[in-house]
Image (spheres, rainbow, N blue to C red):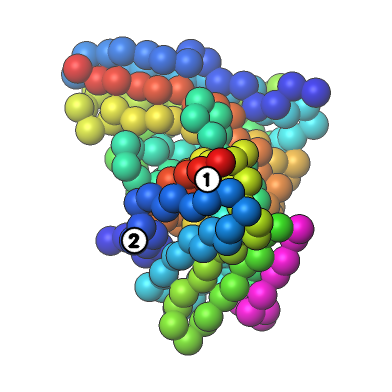
Amino acid sequence: DAGVTQSPTHLIKTRGQQVTLRCSPISGHKSVSWYQQVLGQGPQFIFQYYEKEERGRGNFPDRFSARQFPNYSSELNVNALLLGDSALYLCASSPIAGRMNEQFFGPGTRLTVL
Amino acid sequence: DQQVKQNSPSLSVQEGRISILNCDYTNSMFDYFLWYKKYPAEGPTFLISISSIKDKNEDGRFTVFLNKSAKHLSLHIVPSQPGDSAVYFCAASRGETGANNLFFGTGTRLTVIP
């Protein structure tokens, strides 16, 4: 079975641009969470979606937004990119918006903002 | 403010010996703790967890110890194997559900020397 997939793998943008990252959860999983991992730091929670509804939001500015589609895939959008947005963006899926030990992470999208 | 801290960025251990990875937390409301392992170009993988009602949880070669009074937990790997070489993240939450409650440490890179 396929695991969590994310696209693109790598991305280079310039300050002020907008970016969209995509995540496909494991088949049957209805919850998707997004994390930002800055170099040298641990992952930091951004959003959680379950059944297309936002279930949680981390301490990130409104430039960050996300949505979940009927097939449970998800997109993370970041507007007006800043240099500090350079990070590995991880997506995790779980069967429900429940236990963290049931989260499966994708390989991430490496975003570089120049 | 870093609520979960892993003060050792790296650790090297000989194959067959014990690896001890440490983690400290500051928020006394945390009652569920997890360890994740991360290989390069892959997302974090759940390894083992412990609830605050326990002080020890064991799964094969992996044991997690929790000292609530010291706000400290540790992961023991015995015996260490070269395949254990990875970055290990400690994470803590209030409750076992809800990704928005999950806080990660900065990670410890374990190298097991054959």
Closer to the chain start, of discs 2 and 1, is 2
**Residue type beneath disc 1:** Val
Q: Residue at x 66, y 75 (%)?
A: B56
Chain where mark 2 sits: B
Q: Which residue is drawn at 39% across and 38% down?
A: A37
The nearer-to-camera label among 2 and 1 is: 1
**Residue type beneath disc 2:** Asn
User: What residue span does the magenta drawing correspond to?
Assistant: B52-60
- Cβ atoms under marks 2 and 1 closer than 8 Å: no
Q: Which residue is drawn at 35% across and 51% down?
A: B9
In the picture of the structure, the residue carrying the numbered disc 1 is B112
The answer to whether tags 2 and 1 share a subunit is yes
Quadrant of the image containing the N terminus of chain A: top right
Q: Where is residue B90 in the image (x, y as percent from the top left)?
A: 50, 57
| Residue at far bottom of view | B69
Residue B113 is one of the magenta-drawn residues: no
Q: Position of residue A107 (x, y in %)?
A: 54, 27
Chain where mark 1 sits: B
